[in-house]
Image: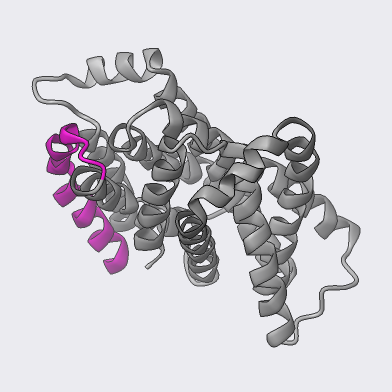
Amino acid sequence: MCALSDSIASLMNKKLISKKQDPMSVSLFIHAFGALAFFILALLTAQKLFPISSELLLLLIITAAATAAAGVILLMAFRKGDLSLIAPIQTITPLLILIIGIFFLKETPSPLGLIGIVLIVLGGILLDKNPNETLGSIAKRIVSYKPALLGVLAAALYALVSVFDKGGLKITALGVWIFYVYFFIFIFLLPIVLIKRRRELVKLKDNKLLLLASAFFSVSAIYLQLLALQTALVTYVLSIKRLSSVLAVILAYFVLKENRALFRLKGAAIMVLGAILIGLS
């Protein structure tokens, strides 16, 4: 469900950016929507929002800053490049998390789970492969293609954020953690948007329904991801979430008419097989 929500959110975000909406203004609205939604969730589940320890506050600020940066960078990538090119690049996230998780969370996947992670990453690379293209030329293209580099940077930041999320959920309740993360991101972005992008913020009203859909599915994806993090290794959860790349490529072909997307479906079977192995592990 997280992967499905994430792929739909990517589609909505791509459509918003294609309509000349400002990435930072879109991100501000999404996090305002999320902060309100999770504030209500915390109240309904009787989770105490106050007080918070200095340790939790520091972790929240770092997480919010990294998440805000990753979100804006990814929206910038969508503005400059095709969704079907950028979404598969996000599949490197599990590999980054695997390395981080081993060193900082002491989470070591089982052999079967490790094979599943590798298959998902490999399938993601094949999703990004054009006909008659070698793995070496893919690497060169990513290095020389600015939207792809932005996608890699966003993936690295999201890898760090997922580890911070895991740590935060050990300290406090899910509703409290996610409310503060979204609230702090909103606070970080608000002065920047009001000072430098006030006119762009007003333009958001031109695509109200699309914006609300983007916010709903973006927030849903994060909530489902955090629910999953409470039950499994970080690298497993993010590997399964990367199946959103398969769904995003399909949506890019049928909805955005990105014809190159069809050639990237050959990696889908490998990614699904990897997800099955993770589930079996």
Query: Going 43% across and 38% down the picture, which residue do you hit?
Result: 19
Please tell me whether residue 112 is drawn above or below residue 256 in the rendered image. Answer: below
- In magenta stretch: residue 269: yes
Asked if residue 109 can be seen in this view, the reply is no
Residue 215 or residue 155, whichever sits in front? 215
Residue 114 or residue 200, whichever sits in front? 200
The part of the chain drawn in magenta is: 256-281
Q: From the image, which quarter does the C terminus lie in? A: bottom left
Quarter of the figure with residue 25: top right
Query: Going 54% across and 62% down the picture, which residue do you hit?
Result: 219
Residue 155 or residue 270, whichever sits in front? 155
Quarter of the figure with residue 66: top right
Total label count?
A: 0
Residue 204 relative to residue 129: left or right? right
Image x and y of residue 18, in percent: 41, 36
Residue 17 relative to residue 49: left or right? left
Asked if residue 80 can be seen in this view, the reply is yes
Q: Residue furthest left?
A: 132
Please tell me whether residue 153 is drawn above or below residue 61 in the rendered image. Answer: above
Image x and y of residue 276, in percent: 23, 62
Query: Going 19% across and 37% down the picture, which residue do you hit?
Result: 261
Q: Residue furthest front?
A: 206
Query: Going 22% across and 22% down the picture, which residue do you hit?
Result: 135
Image x and y of residue 45, in percent: 68, 86
Secondary structure of the magenta portion, mostly?
Answer: helix
Q: From the image, which quarter does the N terminus lie in? A: bottom left
